[in-house]
Image (tube, helix red, strand yellow):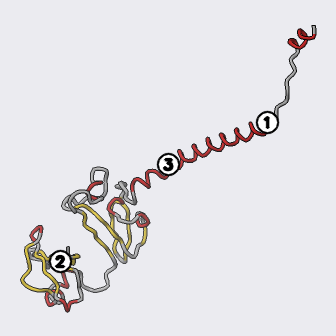
Amino acid sequence: MRDATAAESPDFEVVDSTLMKRVFYIFAALALLSVAISVGGKWLGRSIAMAGYSDDTMVRQIVMGNNLISVPANFIRFDQARRDGIASRLDLYLRYPEMDGYSAAARDDFNHTTTRKIIFLSFEPRMMSRDMSGRFAPIYSALIEKPGTPGPGGTTVYAFSEKSGYLNEVLAVAERPGKDPFVARCLSG
């Protein structure tokens, strides 16, 4: 009869649950870590994958001195400069000859996996009364070695003389009918 009674009212032994609590906490911690990695990956993943580039084409209004420069965000080289407002300097990069900024389609060009097609532009407030074109005749023409060599887009590329102070730079000049010539100082190579 004792066996029948035992079957009807089973006695349960209390097991120390410290081990089970530890296992539960470990699984809970792993689950939270997994969620954090997933959320963090979605939040940071795009910025990591973009490697500092932006495909945002929103036009930014940058004020530099008395000038307002309107430029798409994907032309702006540095992330901290991709905002509207006052700036002391603006650095851009774009593909040549397409003259467009970073995009998924242009990724290879910006990562230099194809031919080098990226040009870099820097804008700073004017420190002189003359712009680059106005400086050609009075300043640059005395500092270049003539004759120049034909360059891309109808330009003539001149090397600077050693005494000029423009080491590793060349001067690209393109004549414009009825206007001062187009002039750009460029890094050589």
Task: State the image coordinates of residue 187 (x, y, percent, origin top left).
Answer: 23, 76
Is 67 located above or below residue 146 in the figure?
above
Q: Nearer the viewer, mark 2 or mark 1?
A: 1
Q: Residues within 10 Å of mark 2 (few under 14, many from 20)?
A: many
Name which of mark 2 and mark 1 comes first in the sequence: 1
Q: On the image, which quarter does residue 68 sit in?
A: bottom left
Task: State the image coordinates of residue 148 (x, y, percent, origin top left).
Answer: 8, 80
Name which of mark 2 and mark 3 comes first in the sequence: 3
Q: Is residue 17 left or right of residue 187?
A: right
Q: Amino acid at mark 1?
A: Ser
- For the residues marked 2 and 1, what is the alpha-carbon distance in whole angstroms? 81 Å
Q: Secondary structure at mark 1?
A: loop
Q: Nearer the viewer, residue 99 or 27?
A: 27
Q: Nearer the viewer, residue 49 or 182?
A: 49
Q: Amino acid at mark 3?
A: Gly
Q: Nearer the viewer, residue 153 or 146?
A: 146
Residue designated by label 3:
41
Q: On the image, which quarter does residue 35 sit in?
A: top right
| The label number, if any, that marks residue 183 in the structure image | 2
Q: Secondary structure at mark 3?
A: helix
Q: Nearer the viewer, mark 3 or mark 1?
A: 1
Q: Residues within 10 Å of mark 3 (few under 14, many from 20)?
A: few
Is 166 located above or below residue 56 in the figure?
below
Residue designated by label 1:
17
- For the residues marked 2 and 3, what is the alpha-carbon distance in whole angstroms? 47 Å
- For the residues marked 3 and 1, what is the alpha-carbon distance in whole angstroms? 36 Å
Task: State the image coordinates of residue 154 (x, y, percent, origin top left).
Answer: 9, 70
